[in-house]
Image (tube, helix red, strand yellow):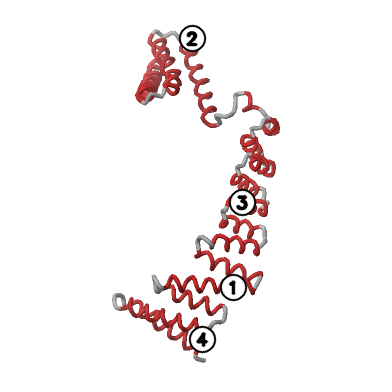
Amino acid sequence: MLRIILMLGFVGAILLSGFFTFVCLYARNLKLSGYSLVYLIPSILGAYFTWSWNLRYVAYVIGFLIVATIYAFLKITEPELGIFERFLSPESLEKRGKLYHAARKYEKRKDYVKAAKAYIKANAIESAAWAYEKAKLFQKAAECYEKLGEYKDASEAWKKAGDLRKAAEALEKLAEEEEWYLEDAAKLWESVDKEKAKRAWRRVAEYYEKEAKEEGVFYEDAAKAYEKIGEIEKAKECYEKFIEYCKEQAKEDEAWLKYVEETKEKIEKSFNT
């Protein structure tokens, strides 16, 4: 039974490594072809020794294949590290200039601050931000995200750090490219700076009014934003345009009439009292 299992294993290894060798040779990749031969030749020898039932040499072949597999795994996962360097401490790796790998080792031992600093030296800023978040140093994480121009993540980190002002500023930077974040920024400003909140809501209103020219449903959002800053006439005007839009939609779907009545009622209560 053992002989059959070993033979099947070696035959499978021969077929797999043989196919891979053929593909690499066809692609003219001599380097990978050489690596695959490291598996193919011992597998053939293993099959032969199994057939002749020379257990000592079978054990040698299996041992060689195990070592080769471990070596291949190590080279694939961290190709820049030598075998000896894999056993060094993160401090030693840092001294050798292997900053990224040192940072990864710091992370594995949960020393996230040192990991973040090593990542920064390695110019892996995003990894540094993640490490700072794991260390609960959200201010540092936010600063890293801002360096990368990832203002959404920066805003979230600033909020976790308790700095809503900087969180709002980050969203405003994001809104320069993606205007729909203006409303999120305005909501944050309401907590820390009423004047900036008012300016932000005005930008929100203008943004939605611009969008409404393409899709009238945004007139309602524009109206709500104008209400926030006390521009009643502009709000009423936008609500009326929203009603007209709903009436047009109701020609195809009567469900829109519900919004017509609700908006009329809102105008009556809010603006005509």
Image height check: is 196 above or below 118?
Answer: below
Q: What's under tag 2, amino acid-wise?
A: Arg
Whether residue 104 sits left or right of residue 60 in the image: it is: right
Residue 12 seen anywhere in this rendered image of the structure: no
Q: What's under tag 4, amino acid-wise?
A: Ser
What is the CA distance from the residue labelled 1 to the residue labelled 4?
23 Å
Q: Name the residue rendered at 63%, 23% in the picture.
A: 84
Q: Name the residue rendered at 62%, 42% in the picture.
A: 123
Q: Quadrant of residue 81?
A: top right
Viewer-closest of 173 and 39: 173
Residue neighbourhood size for the residue with mark 3, other residues' Cα within 10 Å, grouped as few (<14), some (14–19), many (≥20): few
Observer-side mark, 4 or 2, equals 4
| Residue 167 image offset from top left, x and y in percent | 62, 61
Q: Which residue is mark 4?
A: 270
Q: Are marks 3 and 1 in contact (CB under 8 Å)?
A: no
Quarter of the rendering occupied by the N terminus: top left
Q: Closer to the N terminus: mark 3 or mark 2?
A: 2
Q: Which residue is mark 2?
A: 56
Observer-side mark, 1 or 4, equals 1
| Residue 26 image offset from top left, x and y in percent | 34, 24
What is the CA distance from the residue labelled 2 to the residue labelled 1?
82 Å
Q: Are marks 3 and 4 in contact (CB under 8 Å)?
A: no
